[in-house]
Image (cartoon, grey):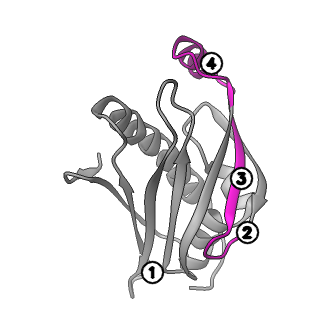
Protein backbone atom coordinates (compact mmCIF):
# COMPACT_ATOMS: atom_id res chain seq x y z
CA UNK A 1 0.00 0.00 0.00
CA UNK A 2 1.19 3.53 -0.69
CA UNK A 3 2.00 6.13 1.92
CA UNK A 4 -0.34 9.08 1.68
CA UNK A 5 -0.12 12.78 2.43
CA UNK A 6 -2.67 15.50 1.76
CA UNK A 7 -1.45 15.89 -1.81
CA UNK A 8 0.67 12.84 -2.74
CA UNK A 9 0.87 9.06 -2.75
CA UNK A 10 4.24 7.37 -2.27
CA UNK A 11 5.11 3.81 -3.27
CA UNK A 12 8.35 2.15 -2.19
CA UNK A 13 10.00 -1.03 -3.41
CA UNK A 14 13.40 -2.62 -2.81
CA UNK A 15 15.04 -4.72 -5.50
CA UNK A 16 18.09 -6.90 -5.80
CA UNK A 17 18.93 -5.51 -9.22
CA UNK A 18 21.28 -2.98 -10.68
CA UNK A 19 20.39 0.69 -10.81
CA UNK A 20 21.22 0.49 -14.52
CA UNK A 21 18.58 -2.18 -15.14
CA UNK A 22 15.88 -0.42 -13.15
CA UNK A 23 16.66 2.88 -14.86
CA UNK A 24 16.45 1.25 -18.29
CA UNK A 25 13.07 -0.27 -17.44
CA UNK A 26 11.82 3.27 -16.78
CA UNK A 27 13.58 5.05 -19.65
CA UNK A 28 13.73 2.85 -22.77
CA UNK A 29 11.03 1.83 -25.23
CA UNK A 30 11.58 -1.88 -24.64
CA UNK A 31 11.80 -1.39 -20.88
CA UNK A 32 8.57 0.60 -20.66
CA UNK A 33 6.68 -1.79 -22.92
CA UNK A 34 7.81 -4.76 -20.79
CA UNK A 35 5.93 -3.69 -17.64
CA UNK A 36 4.16 -0.34 -17.96
CA UNK A 37 0.43 -0.13 -17.32
CA UNK A 38 -1.78 -1.94 -14.85
CA UNK A 39 -2.35 -5.68 -15.16
CA UNK A 40 -4.59 -6.53 -18.08
CA UNK A 41 -3.29 -3.69 -20.25
CA UNK A 42 -0.59 -3.61 -22.93
CA UNK A 43 1.48 -0.55 -23.77
CA UNK A 44 3.05 0.47 -27.07
CA UNK A 45 5.49 3.41 -27.02
CA UNK A 46 5.24 5.74 -30.03
CA UNK A 47 7.67 8.46 -28.94
CA UNK A 48 10.32 8.65 -26.24
CA UNK A 49 12.35 11.85 -25.97
CA UNK A 50 14.20 11.49 -22.66
CA UNK A 51 15.18 15.05 -21.78
CA UNK A 52 13.57 17.86 -19.77
CA UNK A 53 10.68 19.06 -21.93
CA UNK A 54 10.75 15.82 -23.94
CA UNK A 55 7.73 13.58 -24.22
CA UNK A 56 6.74 9.98 -23.82
CA UNK A 57 3.75 9.18 -26.02
CA UNK A 58 2.21 5.75 -25.72
CA UNK A 59 -0.97 3.82 -26.30
CA UNK A 60 -2.45 1.65 -23.56
CA UNK A 61 -4.95 -1.03 -24.55
CA UNK A 62 -7.17 -3.15 -22.31
CA UNK A 63 -6.43 -6.78 -23.24
CA UNK A 64 -7.88 -8.79 -20.35
CA UNK A 65 -11.67 -9.42 -20.22
CA UNK A 66 -12.01 -7.89 -16.74
CA UNK A 67 -10.31 -4.65 -17.80
CA UNK A 68 -12.27 -4.56 -21.06
CA UNK A 69 -15.52 -4.83 -19.10
CA UNK A 70 -14.41 -2.15 -16.60
CA UNK A 71 -13.46 0.29 -19.37
CA UNK A 72 -16.76 -0.24 -21.18
CA UNK A 73 -18.82 0.23 -18.00
CA UNK A 74 -16.86 3.40 -17.20
CA UNK A 75 -17.63 4.77 -20.66
CA UNK A 76 -13.95 4.81 -21.55
CA UNK A 77 -12.35 3.60 -24.77
CA UNK A 78 -10.45 0.29 -24.69
CA UNK A 79 -7.38 2.03 -26.11
CA UNK A 80 -6.18 5.37 -24.80
CA UNK A 81 -3.33 7.57 -25.91
CA UNK A 82 -1.20 8.93 -23.10
CA UNK A 83 1.28 11.76 -22.89
CA UNK A 84 3.97 12.43 -20.35
CA UNK A 85 6.37 15.38 -20.29
CA UNK A 86 9.71 14.97 -18.54
CA UNK A 87 10.64 17.78 -16.15
CA UNK A 88 13.85 16.44 -14.58
CA UNK A 89 16.29 13.69 -15.48
CA UNK A 90 19.25 12.76 -13.31
CA UNK A 91 20.50 9.53 -14.91
CA UNK A 92 20.13 6.47 -12.70
CA UNK A 93 18.93 8.61 -9.77
CA UNK A 94 15.80 10.66 -10.43
CA UNK A 95 13.13 10.91 -13.09
CA UNK A 96 10.39 13.54 -12.82
CA UNK A 97 7.52 14.03 -15.21
CA UNK A 98 3.92 14.99 -15.43
CA UNK A 99 1.30 12.77 -16.92
CA UNK A 100 -1.52 14.50 -18.74
CA UNK A 101 -4.80 13.18 -17.30
CA UNK A 102 -7.00 13.71 -20.34
CA UNK A 103 -8.87 10.40 -20.30
CA UNK A 104 -11.47 11.04 -17.59
CA UNK A 105 -15.02 11.48 -18.91
CA UNK A 106 -16.47 14.86 -17.95
CA UNK A 107 -13.23 16.22 -16.44
CA UNK A 108 -11.03 18.86 -18.08
CA UNK A 109 -7.47 17.60 -18.72
CA UNK A 110 -4.93 18.34 -16.01
CA UNK A 111 -1.34 17.41 -15.17
CA UNK A 112 -0.35 14.88 -12.50
CA UNK A 113 3.25 15.16 -11.27
CA UNK A 114 5.33 11.99 -10.74
CA UNK A 115 8.82 11.50 -9.32
CA UNK A 116 10.85 8.28 -9.40
CA UNK A 117 13.96 8.08 -7.21
CA UNK A 118 16.51 5.26 -7.12
CA UNK A 119 18.64 4.80 -4.00
CA UNK A 120 21.34 2.10 -4.26
CA UNK A 121 22.83 0.60 -1.11
CA UNK A 122 26.24 -1.01 -0.55
CA UNK A 123 24.60 -4.44 -0.10
CA UNK A 124 23.46 -4.53 -3.74
CA UNK A 125 19.86 -3.52 -3.13
CA UNK A 126 18.11 -0.58 -4.76
CA UNK A 127 15.28 1.24 -3.03
CA UNK A 128 12.87 2.79 -5.51
CA UNK A 129 10.50 5.54 -4.37
CA UNK A 130 7.64 6.63 -6.66
CA UNK A 131 5.70 9.72 -5.60
CA UNK A 132 2.60 10.87 -7.47
CA UNK A 133 0.19 13.74 -6.99
CA UNK A 134 -3.30 12.77 -5.97
CA UNK A 135 -5.98 12.95 -8.63
CA UNK A 136 -8.90 15.40 -8.73
CA UNK A 137 -11.10 13.38 -6.35
CA UNK A 138 -10.92 10.47 -3.90
CA UNK A 139 -12.38 7.92 -6.33
CA UNK A 140 -9.81 8.65 -9.04
CA UNK A 141 -7.03 8.78 -6.44
CA UNK A 142 -8.05 5.26 -5.33
CA UNK A 143 -8.07 4.15 -8.97
CA UNK A 144 -4.62 5.67 -9.51
CA UNK A 145 -3.28 3.93 -6.39
CA UNK A 146 -4.73 0.57 -7.49
CA UNK A 147 -3.32 1.09 -10.97
CA UNK A 148 0.14 1.86 -9.63
CA UNK A 149 0.05 -1.14 -7.27
CA UNK A 150 -0.85 -3.34 -10.24
CA UNK A 151 1.74 -1.71 -12.47
CA UNK A 152 4.50 -2.02 -9.87
CA UNK A 153 3.55 -5.67 -9.30
CA UNK A 154 4.40 -6.22 -12.98
CA UNK A 155 7.75 -4.50 -12.45
CA UNK A 156 8.33 -6.58 -9.29
CA UNK A 157 7.66 -9.81 -11.20
CA UNK A 158 9.89 -8.79 -14.09
CA UNK A 159 12.82 -7.96 -11.81
CA UNK A 160 12.27 -11.10 -9.72
CA UNK A 161 12.41 -13.26 -12.84
CA UNK A 162 15.68 -11.61 -13.91
CA UNK A 163 17.33 -10.57 -10.62
CA UNK A 164 20.59 -9.63 -12.27
CA UNK A 165 19.86 -8.39 -15.76
CA UNK A 166 23.25 -6.71 -15.66
CA UNK A 167 26.21 -6.66 -13.33
CA UNK A 168 26.84 -2.92 -13.57
CA UNK A 169 25.66 -0.82 -10.66
Looking at the rendering, the stretch of residues picked out in magenta corresponds to 50-79
Residue 85 percent across, percent down from the top left: 60, 62
Q: Reading the chain from its start, which is encountered first: label 3 or label 4?
A: 3
| Distance between mark 3 and mark 4 Cα atoms | 22 Å
Q: Nearer the viewer, mark 1 or mark 2?
A: 2
Q: Which residue is mark 3?
A: 57
Q: Which residue is mark 2?
A: 49
| Distance between mark 2 and mark 4 Cα atoms | 30 Å
| Distance between mark 3 and mark 1 Cα atoms | 33 Å
Residues marked 4 and 1 touching at CB (< 8 Å) = no
- The image quarter containing residue 131 is bottom left
Q: Which mark is residue 124?
A: 1
Residues marked 1 and 2 touching at CB (< 8 Å) = no
Which image quarter holds the C terminus?
Answer: bottom right
Which type of secondary structure does the marked residue at label 2 adopt?
A: loop
Whether residue 16 is situated above or below residue 157 in the rendered picture:
below
- Count residues near mark 3 (Cα–Cα under 10 Å), then give few for <14, some for 14-19, many for 20+: some
> Can you name the residue that lies furthest to the left here?
6
Residue shown at the point (45%, 60%) measured from the top left: 114
Q: Reading the chain from its start, which is encountered first: label 2 or label 3?
A: 2
Residue 163 appears in the figure: no
Which type of secondary structure does the marked residue at label 4 adopt?
A: helix
Q: Is residue 48 left or right of residue 35?
A: right
Q: Which residue is mark 4?
A: 68
Residue 143 percent across, percent down from the top left: 40, 33
Q: Nearer the viewer, mark 4 or mark 1?
A: 4
Amino acid sequence: MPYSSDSHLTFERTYRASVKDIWELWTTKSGIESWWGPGGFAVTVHKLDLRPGGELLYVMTAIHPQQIEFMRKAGMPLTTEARMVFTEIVPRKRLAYYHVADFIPGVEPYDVAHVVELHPSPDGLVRMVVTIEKMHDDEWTRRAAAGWESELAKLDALLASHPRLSKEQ
